[in-house]
Image: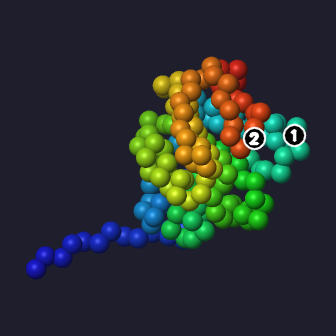
Amino acid sequence: MSILAQEKFYTTDDIYALPDGKRAELIDGQIYYMAPPTRKHQRIVGEMFATIREYINNNQGICEVNIAPFAVFLNKDDTTYVEPDICVICDRDKLTDRGCSGAPDWIIEIVSPGSRPMDYYTKLFKYQTAGVQEYWIVDHERNLVTVYDFQNDNAANYIFSDNIPVRIYPGFFINLSTLNI
């Protein structure tokens, strides 16, 4: 009789026990290590974060925008921990000193060469099933933004020069070609 080796099941304790400078995400008890982001990646994240924060502040919005590394305990448990590049949380009861407990309203991931399958497949499924309302995948190599509106079961592709509507904020559009990226 052969016995199959069991995979190790990780928790957020394992994430917090990582050596300083080592970043990883945890999805369904499996650790996914993260490579350092590129300069282009960080410029896109920074400019988009600033644009969203400015919109929220100028419109007396109740939502809070956060930038990675920011802990999101997606399923309110210790087996799924992600650090979206940008996330917007409108339910302040989800916010703790540790991060966000539950699904943010809007998540944006900037694609890196090593994160492509994770952003397009693994996280897409996790975010949809966790209750995220809106998920953007920004792919600068392809000049493409894929927007998932999970509440209305819609998906759309935009290029950077399009005025991309923000579903959770009617009347708010982001045009990435106007940002300093």
Q: Quadrant of the N terminus?
A: bottom left
Residue 92 % position (x, y): 78, 60
For the rendered model, the colour scheme is: rainbow
Using residue 171 as the reference point, say whether residue 45 is left or right of it: left
Q: How many marks?
A: 2
Which label sits on residue 169? 2
Q: Quadrant of the C terminus?
A: top right
Q: Which quadrant of the figure has residue 50?
A: top right
Residue 135 % position (x, y): 59, 44
Q: Is residue 24 visible?
A: no
Q: Name the residue at 76% across, 33% down.
A: 172
Q: Which class describes the residues within 10 Å of circle 1: few (<14), some (14-19), or many (20+)? A: few
Asked if residue 4 is positioned above or below residue 80 in the image, the reply reads below
> Label 2 near label 1: C-beta < 8 Å?
yes
Using residue 49 as the reference point, say whether residue 109 is left or right of it: left
- Amino acid type, callout 2: Tyr
Q: Name the residue at 77% across, 33% down.
A: 171
Q: Which residue is mark 1?
A: 59
SS at mark 2? loop
Q: Name the residue at 79% across, 40% down.
A: 53
